[in-house]
């Protein structure tokens, strides 16, 4: 497995209130297998090799030029959408104990080759 591309985008805010605001600030990391069709993506969403991908996170942050903030990244099937498992990814489980940093409010998209 090889990291092909790392892109960082701003999160967009959905909804109002403190709950929506805390979700907006939470950084997310999504992995996208290269050359995966939309059908393959739909079929494989619930069976991703997330334990292997989790090992790549330090290298992803290094390639993005972001110092590791010390987060404990956990796999969340509902990282991008609280209603369904349509956008699984990694979110920090200990964000409240770490001050704001360059990852706050960002989404990291990682393209990998399998």
Image (cartoon, rainbow, N blue to C red):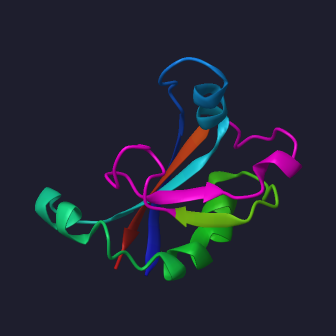
Instruction: Name the residue at 76% across, 60% down.
Output: 71
Q: Classify the position of the C terminus by image quarter.
A: bottom left
Q: Position of residue 12 (x, y in %)?
A: 50, 27
Q: Residue furthest left?
A: 39
Q: In the figure, 56 relative to 66: above or below? A: below
Is any atom of residue 36 visible in this view? no
Q: Is residue 81 left or right of residue 73?
A: left
Where does residue 43 sit, x and y in percent of width and height?
A: 18, 68
Q: Where is residue 20 in the image (x, y as percent from the top left)?
A: 57, 28
Q: Residue at x 59, y 32 (%)?
A: 24
Q: Look at the image and say whether residue 85 sits in the magenta stretch.
A: yes
Secondary structure that dominates the magenta span: loop
Q: Does the magenta stretch include residue 97?
A: yes
Does the rendering let one see residue 34?
yes
- Please, is residue 9 above or below residue 95 in the view? above
Quadrant of the image occupied by residue 70:
bottom right
Across and down, in percent, residue 75 comes to 53, 66
| Magenta region | 76-105
* Left or right position of 30 against 93: left
Residue 52 vertical placement versus 102 (above, below): below
* In-image side of 88 versus 45 (left or right): right
How many labels sit on residues? Answer: 0
Quarter containing the N terminus: bottom left
């Amino acid at each position: 497995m090889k990291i092909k591309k790392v892109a960082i985008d701003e999160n967009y805010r959905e909804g109002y209130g403190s709950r929506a605001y805390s979700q907006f600030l939470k950084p997310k990391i999504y992995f996208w297998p290269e050359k995966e069709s939309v059908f393959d993506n739909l079929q494989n969403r619930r069976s991703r090799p997330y334990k292997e991908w989790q090992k790549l996170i330090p290298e992803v942050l290094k390639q993005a030029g972001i110092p590791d903030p010390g987060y404990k990244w956990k796999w969340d099937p509902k990282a991008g959408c609280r209603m369904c498992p349509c956008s699984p990814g990694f979110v920090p489980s200990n964000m409240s104990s770490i001050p704001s940093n360059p990852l706050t409010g960002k989404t990291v998209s990682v393209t990998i080759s399998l």
